[in-house]
Amino acid sequence: MQDPAQDNNPRQDKNNDTWSGRFNEPVAELVKRYTASISFDHKLAVFDIQGSLAHAQMLAACNIISSQDLKDIQRGLAQIENEIIAGEFAWSVDLEDVHLNIEKRLTALVGDAGKRLHTGRSRNDQVATDVRLYLRHSIDDLLGLVRALQIALLDLAENHTNTIMPGFTHLQVAQPVSFAHHLMAYFEMLKRDTERLHDCRKRVNRLPLGAAALAGTSYPIKREYVAELLGFDGVCENSLDAVSDRDFAIEFTACGALIMTHLSRFSEELILWMSPRFGFIDIADRFCTGSSIMPQKKNPDVPELVRGKTGRVNGHLVALLTLMKGQPLAYNKDNQEDKEPLFDTVETLTQTLRIYADMIGGITVKPEAMRNAALQGYATATDLADYLVRKSLPFRDAHEAVALAVRFAEQRGCDLGDIGLAELQQFSALIGEDVYQVLSLEGSLASRNHTGGTAPNQVASAIAKARASLSK
Ligand code: ARG
């Protein structure tokens, strides 16, 4: 039979004794599961331990705990870390989150020293610290992965400064460009993504610990010392802000959304280029799948999924912005919802970047198909207009003369370069024999000979400059 006295005594509820002195009944099962974050925030465990070690070291240095307490805490946390790494740590949903799980185990291992660890600290500044440590680590990993993708792009571009393809506007053939030039556009996007991550890292790398619940703590702590121990560039300057804002996570997710957006655009192009209508490239079989019904199919699943997963990262950005927008200062439990979007953003970016670098290395280029496509669609019409301008025809008149020439070629079903000189001269008497060089794809590329242009020597130096920037 149940003892009614026990029912009314929450202290008997061993699972909820962190704050149970204040409560008359245990938390409802459903609520316990609803409010628990352990199923996902266990990912923060190693960072939680790092933060706790630094906090304990500071407490001892400031004589807030004894050096024996510090030793016990260090020994206990080392064992806990081993248990976690070995997959032997028993996470309990009853203990709500990663912080309480670790603290409870520490106390079981080392006794009172474990209970002293939380002196001058709250889970509010603790979790903000953990997330920042996690994010800093993730940013450093991602920077390496973006760099690897950039190298893959350079390796491919290097061989294709003379491979001519149509450049498009409105997905209509516009002007010829080199395949290398096209690839280098993505290099530039990734370069800015890298800059953004570096910049975001500066704001991530500030220490919240010491803010405690919201107002700071009455113990004589040294926040700067903790910051130094954890490799932070400094401390968060306002305790209310330190525990409550997640702008750094939003900013990171925005960086992530842009990376995914760039790769999504690239993916769209790879998908088009691989389709038989274009036939510009082939993607290695290991990145494609077949169809269960159509034996002839080879589908570009990886780029399609990258395009698809961009939506999910964009969603995380909106989720985090929305999470923040209505919160009064300081900490609110809403913030617990920052983790899953953030973790999934990191996970999605990590996998995507990794697979992308490999996939770029596995692309087969089909220069003939690119060239044939560039020869259709009057890609050198602008070159003809520029030629006439060089012969002192005003640009608008040149534009009109070339429009008529294109119409003529279209009716005849040929390219501009296939029209005889006498016939071309009907459109402008300024046209001479030297026009055919201008109308050639090579001539068109070579003429765009300035920084950022598609001339092969310009693109080659852009590639060299890019390589040098990566080895810095
Ligand atoms: N699990 C919580 C989170 O992720 C930790 C902080 C909880 N603080 C609190 N006062 N309930 O945000």
Image: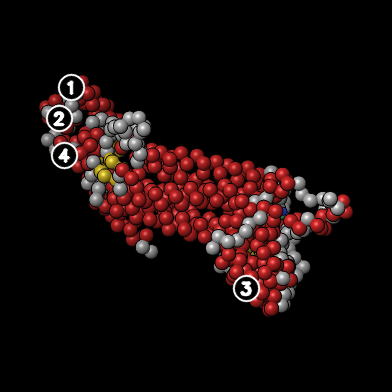
Q: What element carries label 4?
A: helix
Looking at the image, residue 378 lies above or below residue 42? above
Residue topped by disc 4: 437
Residue 470 appears in which quarter of the rendering? bottom left
In the rendered structure, find residue 412 and report the number of the disc placed on it: 1
The disc, 2 or 1, on the residue closer to the chain's N-terminal end is 1
Residue topped by disc 3: 75
Q: How many marks?
A: 4
Q: What residue type is labelled 2?
A: Asp
Q: In this view, does 219 lie to the left or right of 256?
A: right
CB-based contact (under 8 Å), mark 4 and mark 2: no
Relative depth, front residue between 77 and 362:
77
What whole-number distance in Å separates the C-alpha atoms at marks 1 and 4? 21 Å
**Of circles 1 and 3, which is in front?**
3
Q: Is mark 3 on a helix, strand or loop?
A: helix
Looking at the image, residue 459 lies above or below residue 266? below
In the rendered structure, find residue 418 and report the number of the disc placed on it: 2
